[in-house]
């Protein structure tokens, strides 16, 4: 496996694991922002892994919408990936402050991984 792909995959898997671990805590101890942030960046890195495997460079600072558009141009399997909750109109991090949003972000990250790896 190419070194860049391995690094991005390890990072994405690590971030997804951190998001999941946060949700294993008692509800009063969960930090929804942490779950959302880790899930969000895992999605970016999973999409980046797909692009890197196609010899397309990506930056972690790239907009998720742009990454997803690039992935969709290469493979239509990404048309089934719904990341709409990530596109909050105000781009405010306040949306990341509740448990329901945390669970939605985690689900999107898991779905992204599944689509990238067809598992």
Image (tube, rainbow, N blue to C red):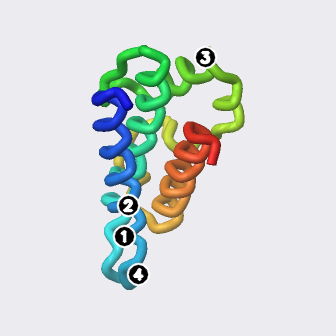
* Separation of residues labelled 3 and 4 (CA atoms): 40 Å
Using the rendered view, name the quadrant where residue 52 is placed.
top left
* Separation of residues labelled 1 and 2 (CA atoms): 6 Å
User: Which is more N-terminal, label 1 or label 4?
Assistant: 1
Percent from the top left, x then y, of residue 104? 55, 57
* Separation of residues labelled 4 and 2 (CA atoms): 17 Å
- Circles 1 and 2 in contact, beta carbons < 8 Å: yes
Disc 1 on helix, strand or loop?
helix
Instruction: Find disc 2 in the rendering and name its residue.
Output: 17
Q: Please tell me how crowded label 1 is: few (under 14), some (14-19), or many (20+) other residues with Cα within 10 Å.
A: few
Label at residue 74: 3
Q: Nearer the viewer, mark 4 or mark 2?
A: 2
Nearer to the camera, 38 or 87 = 38
Q: Residue drawn at (49%, 57%), measured in percent from left and top?
A: 106
Quadrant (top left/top right/bottom left/bottom right) for the N terminus:
top left
- Circles 4 and 2 in contact, beta carbons < 8 Å: no
Label at residue 27: 4
Answer left or right for 52 relative to 119. left
Disc 4 on helix, strand or loop?
helix
């Amino acid at each position: 496996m190419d070194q860049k792909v391995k690094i991005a995959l390890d990072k994405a898997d690590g971030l997804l694991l951190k998001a999941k671990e946060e949700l294993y805590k008692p509800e009063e101890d969960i930090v929804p922002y942490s779950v959302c942030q880790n899930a969000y960046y895992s999605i970016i890195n999973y999409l980046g892994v797909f692009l890197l495997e196609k010899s397309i460079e990506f930056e972690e600072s790239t907009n998720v919408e742009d990454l997803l558009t690039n992935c969709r141009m290469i493979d239509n399997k990404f048309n089934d990936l719904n990341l709409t909750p990530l596109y909050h109109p105000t781009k405010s991090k306040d949306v990341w402050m509740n448990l329901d949003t945390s669970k939605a972000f985690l689900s999107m990250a898991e779905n992204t991984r599944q689509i990238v790896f067809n598992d």
